[in-house]
Amino acid sequence: MQEASDGRSFLEKWIYLNKGDVLTRFPPEPNGYLHIGHAKSITINFGLAQKYGGGCNLRFDDTNPDTEETEYVESIQEDVCWVCQGLDMDKCRDGGKPWVGTPVYASDYFQKMYDFAIDLIKHGKAYVDSQTPEEVQKNRGGGPNNLPGVDSPFRDRSVAENLRLFEEMQAGKHAEGSLLLRAKIDMNHPNMNMRDPPMYRIRFSHHHRTGDRWKVYPIYDFAHGNEDAIEGVTHSICTLEFENHRALYDWFLDNTSIVPSRPYQKEFARLEVQGAFTSKRKLLRLVRDGYVTGWDDPRLLTVRGIRRRGVRPQGVKRMCDAVGVSDRNSVTPWDLVEECWREDMEPISKRRLAVLDPLAVEIMDYDKQELIEGVTDLPDQSAADASCTRALSFSKHVFIDRSDYQENPPEGYFRLGKIGSEVKLRYSYVIKLEEVEKDAAGKVVKLKCSHDPSTRDIMPERKPKVIHWVNAGDCLDAEVRLINPLFLPIPDPLPEGKDWVEYMNPEAWVQCSAKVEKSLGQCVLEDRFQFERCGYFAPDYDCFGTPPKLTFNRVVPLKESADK
Ligand code: ATP
Ligand code: MG
Ligand code: MG
């Protein structure tokens, strides 16, 4: 085995580092916005570091100058910090300090990696290939007939010639695609990744951080392990697609004589969620072609999307823990995701009354105005804690939800239907249906009711169904969005001539013109609400825009079995 530059073997370092000095990394390529799968990787990498008292680097894997943009660097950093709010970050170090989100950049190691490549060339373990890209591809062999590889005619160039050509590549003396630096491994290796893999290619693009200084850029398989080694990463965790790249990861680290440490790669199953896409390419299409409103569309499972929807970082953590870490790929059912987010919402959401599809009710025999005081925000909260109670105003005119009335009620319908049917208004009186008012088109526009004055603070023996309401004279208009999965089931494979975007769920965003209790006008961005009998909701950014527009997104519905 190789000795590291300070004289200790990688094994000594490994043992030493395992004494609580675990260093992991989260290495996004800044070529798009983060999604829920990245959130899982963040949770795993920072979570392991915390558990073993170590650290985790946020590393921008910015080795491809063609696709990377500063816009993405900034958004990723913000999103990582947000996801990390769901973890207990005090216990995770970054360069000896509690993690504060200082990123590192793979592009800072371009010189070191270049030196590593020179080291391999000097030891006869890398060569410059002058074959065309087509020849390189063809001579790799493999394919359906499992062809053997064919050695490049340039494979036996001298060290001196390889050094000169590589230096010329970096000096910009050769056209893009004309030369390739390759590792000299084995053109007949059963693992295709080991058939003299590319290490460096020529690119004349402008890099977002190093500008035009570099004309050669390292390829992922060569770069990644070196980045890990330069940082002293101990555990390099990636998704299962990279399992058969591990031999190559190891080869580069074991064959470069000057790598400063010896990290190890381990793979886990990527997170796939039913009814959603977690591929940057597909997400980009949805955003660019206007299928969604932007990267933070609440229907998307981007980090920005779920954040805007109202999911909390603690809910993301809960979901990642529930899905667990596996070495086999699977699709996470949507129900499980919702269940985790619901569990996170349940204890912290303030109970509020909101009517999503309002139907007017007039209580004919009630002519007062009254305040129902001491209504608690949370179900298990002591009523004595006056700071978390509120007063609801009540009057002759209220709104109930249209779904709590049926003109032709089926057998066993216990809400308002037949004349004489009763319901109890939550925190208020039992009302009885007396008359139904329709407009010219025959649509029911108002229910006229009477009330039972003895029932305000008690549930009568006959136990009518309890429904939600708002005071028509003292409520606010709000836009409420019911967010559902963005995609319907997509057949695999896609039928002839079909495009996956055609399977968007038309009910992924159901907009309601709601009436909500007045206290919601004072909400702040951090608030979470349970609109009683409707689900869990969060204020949308539009509440705080100019002009402000009272808008709520449904984070998750109530449990199916919950009281409807
Ligand atoms: P995409 O396929 O969406 O382009 P990527 O893997 O190319 O994603 P990177 O920026 O390279 O995106 O990802 C950064 C890290 O996040 C990698 O370590 C990668 O393994 C991890 N990651 C990406 N997608 C998922 C996922 N769906 N589940 C778990 N981890 C993921
Ligand atoms: Mg990647
Ligand atoms: Mg990718």
Image (cartoon, helix red, strand yellow):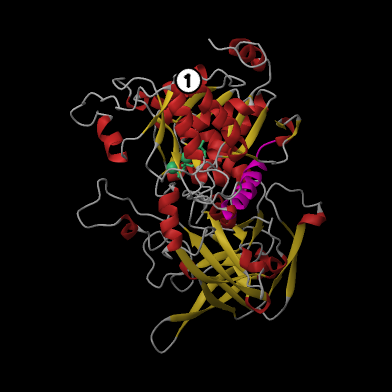
In the rendered view, does 112 fall on the left or right side of 189? right
Quadrant of the displayed image that contains ligand 3: top left
Q: Nearer the viewer, residue 381 or 264?
A: 264
Give the class, few, some or many, for how many residues have Cα within 10 Å of label 1's Cα (few <14, many ≥20).
some
Characterize the magenta stretch by its predominant secondary structure: helix
Q: Nearer the viewer, residue 183 or 412?
A: 183
Q: Find numbered disc 1 in the image and state the secondary structure of the residue it sits on.
A: helix
Residue 163 is inside the magenta segment: no
Q: Which residues are magenta?
A: 71-88
In the rendered view, does 272 fall on the left or right side of 492? right
For the point 57% across and 52% down, the residue is: 72
Return the x and y of residue 331 as percentages of the image width and height.
39, 39
Q: Quadrant of residue 398?
A: bottom right
Reply above or below: 93 against 264: below
For the point 42% across and 70% down, the residue is: 406
Q: Quadrant of residue 106?
A: top right
Reply above or below: 155 against 2: below
Which residue type does callout 1 highlight? Answer: Asp
Return the x and y of residue 281 as percentages of the image width and height.
42, 51
Reply above or below: 423 against 20: below
Reply above or below: 312 against 521: above
Residue 27 visible, this angle: yes
Label 1, on which residue? 250
Return the x and y of residue 489 as percentages of the image width and height.
32, 50
